[in-house]
Amino acid sequence: MIEGSCHCGGVQFRLDGPIDALTTCDCSLCAMRGALMAKVPETALEVTAGEALLTLYQWNTHRARHYFCSRCGIYVFHRKRAAPDHFGVNARCLHDFDLAAVPVHATEGANMTVEDPDPRDRWPGPRVARADPAPG
């Protein structure tokens, strides 16, 4: 078991299983928050305290679900858009975990489609055209 928490300790969690790789992502959100993530199956993540403190942020397709501590603001984990049965866990929130002992791989998020009806110019990625509603 690997224990983790947000900065204030209000949100606490544990991971069941090894972490053999970490990832960075170049999508607009991950690039801004500078996250270093461990991809884990949904069954491997257990929130042990502070679930009520979690706040949700969603953007673009609203498939990914990004969770932050509402008290200290730290990103703790997110349900992944490209792998919805997995979480990306902020490896910097893990206790007694040697980040340097695990290889880091870059993932490409900047080329994922932008499907929001009103996307920000700062969001990279190909735009998906929305069909105009039928006149009615």
Image (tube, helix red, strand yellow):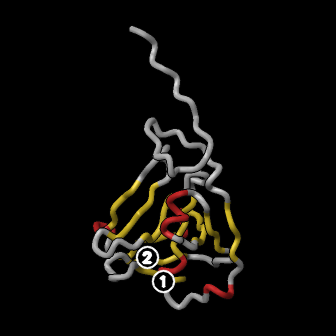
User: Mark 1 falls on what kind of element?
Assistant: strand
Label 1 packing within 10 angstroms: few (<14), some (14-19), many (20+)? some
105 lies left or right of 122: right
Q: Name the residue under label 2.
A: 13
Viewer-proximal residue among 111 and 40: 111
Total marks placed: 2
The residue most toward the front is 121
Q: Position of residue 67 (x, y in %)?
A: 41, 63
Taking the spot 48% from the left edge, 68% from the top edge, the residue there is 33
**CB contact under 8 Å: marks 2 and 1:** yes
**Depicted 113 relative to depicted 13: above or below:** above
Label 2 packing within 10 angstroms: few (<14), some (14-19), many (20+)? many
Q: Residue 3 carries which label?
A: 1
The image quarter containing residue 68 is bottom left
Taking the spot 35% from the left edge, 75% from the top edge, the residue there is 11
Taking the spot 66% from the left edge, 87% from the top edge, the residue there is 100
User: Mark 2 falls on what kind of element?
Assistant: strand
The disc labelled 2 sits on which kind of residue?
Phe
Q: Position of residue 16 (x, y in %)?
A: 56, 76
The residue most toward the top is 136
Q: Position of residue 47 (x, y in %)?
A: 41, 71
The disc labelled 1 sits on which kind of residue?
Glu
Q: Where is residue 115 in the image (x, y as percent from the top left)?
A: 52, 39
Q: Quadrant of the N terminus?
A: bottom right
Q: Which of marks 2 and 1 is nearer the N terminus?
A: 1
Taking the spot 44% from the left edge, 60% from the top edge, the residue there is 66
Marks 2 and 1, how far apart in space? 6 Å
Q: In which quarter of the image is the C terminus?
A: top left
Viewer-proximal residue among 33 and 65: 33
